[in-house]
Image (cartoon, helix red, strand yellow):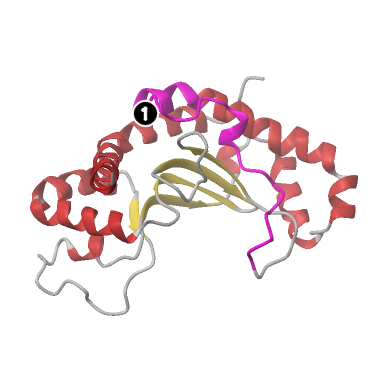
Amino acid sequence: MSFNGFSKETFEFLFEITFNNNVEWFGENRKRYEKFVRDPMRALAAELMPTALSIDPSFNPVVNSSVSRIRRDTRFTYDKSPFRNHMWIGFRYPNTRISEGCTLYFEITPNGYSYGMGFYTTSTAFMAAYRKRLLADPEGFLKLAKALEKRGLRVSGEPYKRDHFPDAPEEIKPYINLKYFYWTRGFEGVSELIAPSDIGERLKAEFKACEPMYRLMQSVLASVCEAQN
């Protein structure tokens, strides 16, 4: 199945399941989900896969594994609603969750979309190594960061309530006073995703633009793994 964009029905389904989040409704509308949500997301993931693998050949090459499931795992959450009202594509290593490691991602919601790279959560060891790397070469990091910011990507994450690094250069503080982080660009509205859409080509270009920062993050991860072994 080639990808030419989503349909209005894609976002109608995501909107409707927000207010009909139950097994009975989903069962009655499963074919809508498969046709308008799951299958187009898989087609887009297949189109993006060669670009993702050119950035990191260790990414999981199985297309279906790169697309989120609409059924939620509610065992460890307060929210027991069984289904998501959003879907994402996440390129990551095999046999890992999206919260483990640096991921290239694209996400759709009922009324918008976003893309970027980064971490759902990070370990204390990684963040310590990451901050050490930035403080050792702030100019080199800022060059990578500003290149992403020129494309509209911004660093985001959970900030500390107070400045944990008062002696750090001021221009670096927004990037290190975070408990975890990711680079993202979000858009209101979904009209640009409706077929015919060039979102596939746009995402290829944006993922390639993320490659230098991704490689930096992976080198930090590698140093942490080496230190722990």
- Residue at figure coordinates x 37%, y 23% from the top left: 54
Quadrant (top left, top right, bottom left, bottom right) of the N terminus: top right
**Magenta segment includes 18:** no
Q: Quadrant of residue 181?
A: bottom left
Query: Residue 141, percent across and down?
Result: 16, 48
Residue 195 seen in the figure: no
Query: Residue 158, percent across and down?
Result: 38, 67
Q: Quadrant of residue 159?
A: bottom left
Query: Residue 121, percent across and down?
Result: 43, 57
Quadrant (top left, top right, bottom left, bottom right) of the C terminus: top left
- Residue at figure coordinates x 35%, y 28% from the top left: 55
Above or below for 165 versus 68: below
Residue 106 seen in the figure: yes
**Magenta segment includes 64:** yes
Q: Is residue 1 left or right of residue 97?
A: right
- Residue at figure coordinates x 52%, y 45% from the top left: 97
On the image, numbered disc 1 is attached to which residue? 56
From the image, give the main secondary structure of the stretch colored magenta.
loop
Residue range in magenta is 48-77
Q: Which class describes the residues within 10 Å of circle 1: few (<14), some (14-19), or many (20+)?
A: some
- Residue at figure coordinates x 64%, y 66% from the top left: 77
Q: Is residue 203 left or right of residue 67?
A: left
Q: Amino acid at mark 1?
A: Asp
